[in-house]
Amino acid sequence: MTYHIQDTKQIYGFLDFSARALIWSIDGSDVELACERVEGVGVVGREEVINWGLSGPMLRSSGIQWDLRKVDNYECYEEFDWEVQWQKEGDSLTRYLAPSR
């Protein structure tokens, strides 16, 4: 069976969803195992993130310390003293954890 890749964003979106589904579907005792299974999987590098115009957790989990909420100061974000949370690994685990940091 042959698959034709039309949109890489859809693929990475699916991989991101799969990682979250895996972690949500297990009990607390298996969290370490689940993290090991998605760590290093679906890596998106800094250059790809920029070239593909990705943002949010995809951007911050691939080594780019940038967040529109910090730069543009919209809504109430300017009222808080916070730092942009970012990681450099760019894998499914990092994308899963990015919004919760």
Image (cartoon, rainbow, N blue to C red):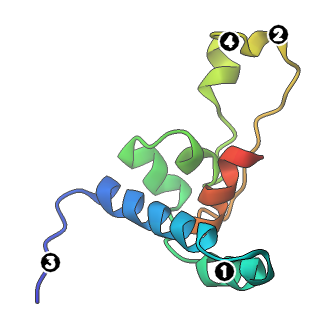
Task: Report which quarter residue 95 is drawn in.
Answer: bottom right
Residue 65 vertical placement versus 63 (above, below): above
Is label 1 in a helix, a strand or a loop? helix
Residue 55 vertical placement versus 17 (above, below): above
Q: Nearer the viewer, residue 47 or 21?
A: 21
Q: Which label's residue is closer to the chain start, 1 or 4?
A: 1
Q: Which residue is mark 2?
A: 79
Q: Which residue is mark 3?
A: 3
Q: Which mark is residue 73?
A: 4
Q: Amino acid at mark 4?
A: Asn
Is label 2 in a helix, a strand or a loop? helix
Structural distance between the alpha carbons of marks 3 and 1: 27 Å
- 94 left or right, relative to 18: right
Q: Kindly tell me whether residue 91 is visible in this rendering.
A: no
Residue 80 percent coordinates (x, y): 85, 17
User: At 65% from the left edge and 34% from the top edge, which residue is drawn?
Assistant: 66
Is label 4 in a helix, a strand or a loop? loop
Structural distance between the alpha carbons of marks 3 and 4: 42 Å
Q: Which label's residue is closer to the chain start, 2 or 3?
A: 3
User: At 88% from the left edge and 20% from the top edge, which residue is drawn?
Assistant: 81
Q: Amino acid at mark 1?
A: Ala
Q: Nearer the viewer, residue 2 or 47?
A: 2
Structural distance between the alpha carbons of marks 4 and 2: 9 Å
Q: Nearer the viewer, mark 3 or mark 1?
A: 1
Q: Kindly tell me whether residue 26 is visible in this rendering.
A: yes
Q: Which mark is residue 34?
A: 1
Q: Which label's residue is closer to the chain start, 3 or 4?
A: 3
Residue 45 percent coordinates (x, y): 53, 61
